[in-house]
Image (tube, rainbow, N blue to C red):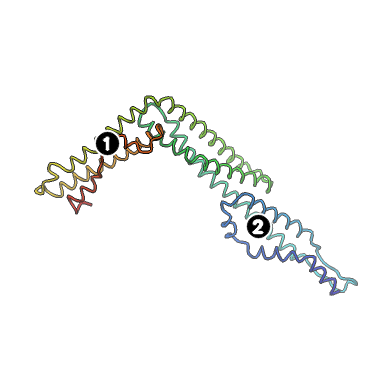
């Protein structure tokens, strides 16, 4: 009788591994897997599936020779089956949430790119903004594509390893594909448009950059001359005027930065400012030298 019990326990010693896994299972386990390779999820799901099969095949009870002892395994089996089923549901919920969150985030980013590409026209300011966005899209393309493939792999994981064909999941997958294709198409169209307009755009950008630099120099000269250099002037009034000049400077500098990005995209020149010998100073520094109390 004792030998039969020991032999039974030996044959089912593998259950201790499942028990330890279930004891350690919790939200932190899935959280630590966030963003992990898809194969890690596949291995985990396959292992849980295998355990579910093994546990379901455990004898409901052991009756020793001569019916001297009966070991009831039903409750242990039922508890393990329930917990393993719970783990499987936890994994599915986690993967679905990952799909949804990552899809929505990527759709938002791709839509932002696409909307800018769709607004492109012959207006030089629109072209500057679009070319900057196109440059950004080209730099991020490999990473965006990698994220796209990861999300699609999550969808495949749900279909193949959970046998779940949810209308909501399928609609999300299709929506992401549509947005991705639209992004690729509009990106290609914008690139072709900018290339076709290059001969006219580059001289215009040079003209606008030169004008912006002249405007910045004018603002600085204005801030360092006339009444601003006269200590007899009313300080608060001068401060307000200087703050206004500083804001104009920052707005023009921001616009100049956009033009520089556009110029770099078209010409490959890293520092288009080097084409213009205009050393531009920051009037905010000059303002604080003249009026230390200026905020």
Q: Nearer the viewer, residue 271 or 103?
A: 271
Q: Earlier in the sequence, mark 2 or mark 1?
A: 2
Q: Residue at x 60, y 42 (%)?
A: 152
- CA–CA distance in space, label 2 to label 1: 67 Å
**Is 230 situated left or right of 208 in this image?**
left
Provide residue 131's location: percent of width, then percent of height.
41, 33
Provide residue 225's location: percent of width, then percent of height.
14, 42
Q: Quadrant of residue 130?
A: top left
Q: Nearer the viewer, residue 146 or 271?
A: 271
Q: Is residue 25 above or below residue 70?
A: above
Provide residue 45's location: percent of width, then percent of height.
67, 53
> Closer to the camera: disc 2 or disc 1?
1
Which type of secondary structure does the marked residue at label 2 adopt? helix
Q: Which residue is mark 2?
A: 87
Q: Is residue 269 above or below residue 240?
A: above
Question: Crowdedness of circle 1 by 10 Å Cα count: few (<14), some, many (20+)?
Answer: few
Q: Is residue 86 above or below residue 253?
A: below
Q: Residue at x 16, y 46 (%)?
A: 238
Q: Quadrant of residue 159?
A: top right
Q: Which residue is mark 1?
A: 277
Of all residues, the one furthest to the left in this rendering is 232
Q: Residue at x 61, y 40 (%)?
A: 170
In the rendered structure, are the residues bearing label 2 and label 1 in contact, judged by CB atoms less than 8 Å apart?
no
**Is 78 situated left or right of 111 in this image?**
right
Which type of secondary structure does the marked residue at label 1 adopt? loop
Provide residue 88's location: percent of width, then percent of height.
66, 55
**Is 293 situated left or right of 109 in this image?**
left
Quarter holding the N terminus?
bottom right
Q: Nearer the viewer, residue 40 or 27?
A: 40
Question: Crowdedness of circle 2 by 10 Å Cα count: few (<14), some, many (20+)?
Answer: some
Q: Quadrant of residue 166?
A: top right
Label ID, residue 214: none
């Amino acid at each position: 009788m004792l030998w039969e019990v020991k032999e039974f326990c030996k044959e089912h010693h593998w259950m201790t591994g499942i028990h330890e896994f279930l004891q350690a299972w919790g939200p932190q386990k899935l959280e630590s897997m966030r963003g992990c390779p898809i194969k890690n999820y596949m291995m985990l799901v396959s292992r849980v599936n295998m355990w579910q099969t093994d546990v379901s095949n455990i004898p409901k009870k052991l009756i020793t020779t001569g019916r001297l002892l009966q070991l009831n395994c039903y409750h242990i089996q039922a508890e393990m089956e329930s917990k393993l089923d719970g783990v499987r549901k936890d994994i599915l919920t986690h993967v679905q949430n990952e799909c949804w969150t990552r899809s929505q985030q990527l759709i938002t980013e791709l839509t932002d790119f696409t909307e800018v590409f769709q607004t492109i026209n012959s207006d030089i300011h629109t072209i500057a903004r679009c070319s900057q966005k196109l440059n950004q899209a080209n730099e991020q393309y490999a990473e965006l594509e990698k994220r796209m493939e990861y999300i699609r792999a999550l969808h495949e994981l749900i279909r193949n390893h959970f046998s779940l064909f949810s209308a909501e999941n399928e609609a999300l997958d299709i929506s992401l594909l549509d947005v991705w294709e639209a992004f690729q198409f509009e990106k290609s169209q914008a690139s072709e448009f900018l290339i076709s307009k290059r001969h006219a755009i580059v001289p215009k950008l040079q003209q606008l950059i030169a004008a912006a630099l002249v405007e910045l120099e004018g603002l600085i000269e204005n801030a360092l001359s006339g009444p601003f250099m006269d200590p007899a002037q009313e300080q608060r009034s001068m401060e307000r005027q200087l703050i206004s000049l500083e804001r104009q400077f920052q707005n023009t500098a921001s616009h100049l930065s956009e033009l520089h990005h556009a110029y770099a995209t078209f010409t490959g020149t890293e520092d288009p400012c080097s084409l213009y010998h205009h050393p531009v100073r920051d009037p905010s520094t000059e303002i604080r030298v003249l009026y230390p109390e200026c905020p």
